[in-house]
Image: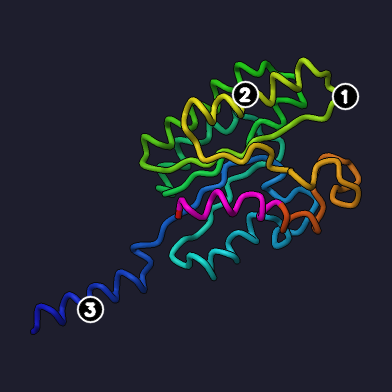
Amino acid sequence: MRNWLRCGVLLLLCVTQGAWAGTVLVVGDSISAAFGLETGQGWVYRLQQRLETHAPEYEVVNASISGDTSSGGLARLPSLLAEHKPEVVILELGGNDGLRGQPPLQMKQNLAAMVERSREAGAKVLLLGMRLPPNLGQRYTTAFAGVFDSLAQEKELPYVPFFLEGVGGVEGMMQADRIHPAANAQERLLDNVWPVLEPLL
């Protein structure tokens, strides 16, 4: 009887101290860093709120930095994995690579390395795809989009093909710079992610 009581106390301590809590690590750029908005307006903050209802054992760590590229994310990733030990890593990078005209193949190699390092650390990976505006040229924009499609297929990744679906280029959903989603678009961004993320939790 005492042994069962002792086990019950230990179980309660584990739960109350968050020993079983999982971490969702978001590694992204300005879109996930809520550029131009209050932190509490961003889709990542809203994700934490949704998890409190649907998966309260999880917490969200937002490691997104405005202006970051796939190479920057790759450089930062090892320390983030070591510190937070996430169960799920959401990769939202590549947009700045494209806007700077960097080679799509290099971006793919960086993202692939991030996937592998995350998996080696025991995390599941969710890839958020991006598309570029047509003014950058059809050849480049097609190659850019193909990076996400092919990487998701080759690595068998849970995947959102276009993270800004229903937001990018939609009147009233973007900030004045026409690059960053407005506050009223953040819930749509979360809704784009949630159906693919929820089965991973």
Question: Which of the two residues, 147 or 36, is positioned nearer the viewer here?
Answer: 147
Tell me the CA gap for discs 3 and 2.
50 Å
State the residue position of label 2. Answer: 147
Q: Earlier in the sequence, mark 2 or mark 1?
A: 1
Could you classify mark 1 by the number of other residues whose Cα lies within 10 Å: few (under 14), some (14-19), or many (20 or more)? Answer: few
Dominant SS type (magenta): helix
Could you classify mark 3 by the number of other residues whose Cα lies within 10 Å: few (under 14), some (14-19), or many (20 or more)? Answer: few
The numbered dot on residue 197 is none
For the point 49% across and 52% down, which residue is it? 24
Q: Is residue 152 left or right of residue 165?
A: left
Could you classify mark 2 by the number of other residues whose Cα lies within 10 Å: few (under 14), some (14-19), or many (20 or more)? Answer: many
Q: Amino acid at mark 2?
A: Val
Q: Earlier in the sequence, mark 1 or mark 3?
A: 3
Residue range in magenta is: 189-200
Residue 33 pos. (x, y %): 68, 48
Q: Amino acid at mark 3?
A: Val
User: From the viewer's perspective, is the residue at label 3 or at label 2 nearer?
Assistant: 2
For the point 60% across and 59% down, which residue is it? 47
Tell me the CA gap for discs 2 and 1.
19 Å
Tell me the CA gap for discs 1 and 3.
62 Å
State the residue position of label 1. Answer: 135
The numbered dot on residue 9 is 3
Could you tell me which secondary element the residue under label 2 belongs to? Answer: helix
Q: Is residue 191 magenta?
A: yes
Q: Earlier in the sequence, mark 3 or mark 2?
A: 3
Could you tell me which secondary element the residue under label 1 belongs to? Answer: helix
For the point 60% across and 66% down, which residue is it? 49
Could you tell me which secondary element the residue under label 3 belongs to? Answer: helix
Quadrant, the C terminus = bottom left
Quadrant, the N terminus = bottom left
Residue 40 pos. (x, y %): 70, 62
